[in-house]
Image: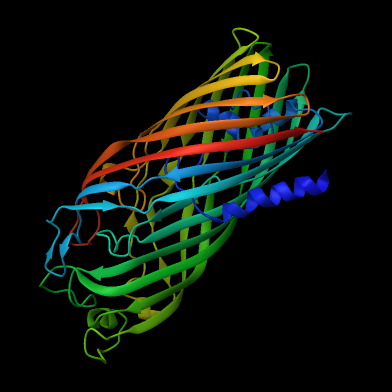
Amino acid sequence: MRKWLWCVVMLCALPGLRGVCHGAGFKVSEQGAKAMAMGNAFAAQADDPSALYFNPAGIAFLTGVQVNLGALGIIVPQTEFRGTTPLSGTPPLDTGSTTAIEHSRRDIVIAPTLYATYALDTLPLSFGFGVNATYPLSKSWSDSSVFRNQVQIASIKPVNFQPTVAYRFDDLNLGVAAGIDVTYAVVSLQKSLYSPTIDPTAPAPPFGAYELGSLGVDGTATDVGYNLGLLWKPRSDLSLGLAYRSKITLDIEGDANYLATTPTGMGAIGLADSAPFPYTRARASSRASTSIPLPDTFDLAVAWRPTEKLTLEFDATRTGWSSFKKLELHFDSPQFAAFNNLPDPKNWRDVWGYKFGAQYQMNPRLALRAGYSFDESPVPNEMVDPLLPDADRHSFSVGAGIGNALGTIDLAYMWVHFVDRAVHNQDMTTLRGANGVFKSDAYLLAANLNLKF
């Protein structure tokens, strides 16, 4: 049995090396198939080991040893953009006014989860351990796209480890929990560089879009946060949940490589043009660093069981995205002075998400589920960009649970529709932003196996 379980863990973990972009900002709330089928309204039920993510206090009410293995599959169609960008047209001078139709690259991503809980027999004390990825990001545009100077490839690939302890006050029917979040992340960024002037070290007319070269940055970070939970069952038909997860700041350190592809690009790193255009090439490297905040979250939840078979839940989640104020790259090498500490303002805002879910227990072996959620976008209109062309989104989900006293298989499907996002923030002096409309959708499939020992 142990050998089989280990094989399943490895098979679930291997696909998780890839990134994903979904959720409020780049938060992924789909951390369990049962919860996902109910629109992620689960913090007041929290009755399987995935409670470690939704409300860790839920594990105080679980019995024995339980292991939950899962995988989330996200089908990401192309994001479509129609409009103008600082590079739409013919560089260097005829840019910014030609309408373009652009599509991001399609993607299929598998994100695994693993949760395990253990309840003591002699004390109302439970322990849990979870492995998931709550803030992955992956966005890719063609190397020749009109966004190539803003992003070609961007990814954050995090793995979060969560040890947790929970205590149950039997007289009050109340569970409380506290845990630690240890997040390790691999971060990559690749884009082409352009300057609005022919000499970026001494800006002067004519103004346009002059190619410099290609920049790639790769780094890693390990940082720590914490989580708290409370689950109270004042009556047999009513549950109330509170959950909080702290902010984690990823202090990323790594390497940057720059390839100058034009004489202008060579001048940007202090080199003279040494070969006839277009054969000029020069490479420079540097240590690099930046910081990316993973915001805090706060959940309020209520679950009501009007009948023995029907459970209804409503959750409200606040995500503190106002901590994401800017993205700024720091380079150690003096050759990178023209690119160093250039602020990329984000100025995101705190947002709320609202989730509604229902479960109907058809019989002891089969449960049917459905849900809806609405998430506000944290990205202000003036800050929308191709790195994350975010928008308010509506999510619709259905699913089922099939099982017995020894274990359950949970399945879920979700359609995420992003409201069309119109932007008007094209800036020809910094060659950033766009004027146009982004359109996106995503389709999610999830499966979890919950075993009880």
Pinpoint residue 101: horizontal percent, then vertical percent: 22, 51
* Percent x, y of residue 337: 34, 76
Query: Can see residue 411?
Result: yes
Residue at the spot x=19%, y=59% of the render? 86
Q: Residue furthest top?
A: 307
Q: Residue extending furthest bottom?
A: 274
Number of numbered discs: 0
Name the residue located 34 percent from the left edge and 39 percent from the top edge.
Answer: 391
On the image, which quarter does residue 203 sit in?
bottom left
Q: Is residue 6 left or right of residue 225?
A: right
Q: Is residue 443 above or below residue 362?
A: below
Q: Quarter-wise, where is residue 33 in the image?
A: top right
Between 68 and 96, which is closer to the camera in this rendering? 68
Which residue is outermost to the right?
122
The answer to whether residue 429 is above or below residue 382 is below
**The one of 453 and 61 positioned closer to us in this rendering:** 453
Q: How is the image coloured?
A: rainbow
Residue 2, x across and y down, in percent: 82, 46
Of the 4 image quadrants, the one containing the C terminus is top right
* 332 horizontally vs 261: left or right: right
Q: Residue at x 69, y 40 (%)?
A: 115
Quadrant housing the N terminus: top right
Res. 41 in view:
no
435 above or below 392? below
Across and down, in percent, residue 290 comes to: 45, 62
Comparing 391 with 408, the one in front is 408
Q: Is residue 128 left or right of residue 413?
A: right
